[in-house]
Image (cartoon, grey):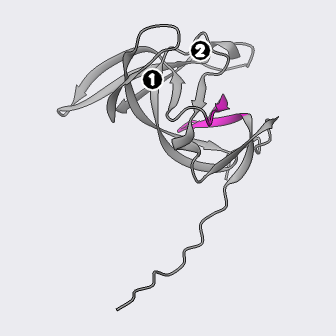
Amino acid sequence: MLLIAPTVALAKPQTLGWLEWSWLEPGAVKIKTKLDTGAKTSSIHAANIVPFERDGVPWVRFQIPLANRSKEIGHVEYLSVERVVERETRIKDHYDESRERYVVKLDMCIGGTRFSTPVTLADRGRFNYPLLLGRLALRGRILVDAERIFTASQSCDS
């Protein structure tokens, strides 16, 4: 007996530039984001990382520095976040020895598309962009045009 699965129409990935604005949820905090097809896993600049347990489950508390926005009226210096630890991973640093990093899921929106994706918590203070979206986050959602920047819609209100 031959079974044929019904065809499911998948949404066509949108094409964005290598540098875009994204919004972290909840709170719709706008953050400059590098779309990097050379990286497998996404990474976000995190400070004051503190592991703890809640009901026997490993969690982590951290802050996402937003200090470079001090000119914006009413903007906070840090976004404080608590998330369940999905796993820990060993990441090779180009400038240092490899080290363990926490992996958490973050909800975000880019180009009008909302999704949740795993990110490693890292000190990205020496980098130009606090959030890097790697292939796992981009797959099936976003194609990257290396010649373009800031092509996504400027809002994720919908």
**To which residue does mark 1 refer?**
121
What SS does tag 1 mark? strand
Q: Nearer the viewer, residue 152 or 27?
A: 152
Eyeballing the image, is 6 above or below 148?
below
Secondary structure beneath label 2: loop
- Closest to the observer: 92 or 83? 92
Examine the rendering and report whether any part of residue 28 can be seen.
no
User: Amino acid type of disc 2?
Assistant: Glu
Location of residue 31 (image quadrant): top right
Residue 130 x %, y %: 60, 22
In the picture provided, is 98 more to the left or to the right than 95?
A: left
Where is residue 90 drawn, in percent x and y? 36, 23
The answer to whether any part of residue 152 appears in the image is yes
Specify the quadrant of the image occupied by residue 92.
top left
Is tag 1's residue or tag 2's residue first in the polypeptide sequence?
Answer: 2
Q: Which mark is residue 77?
A: 2
Magenta span: predominant SS is strand
Residue drawn at x 65%, y 48% as measured from the top left: 142
Name the residue at the bottom extreme. 1
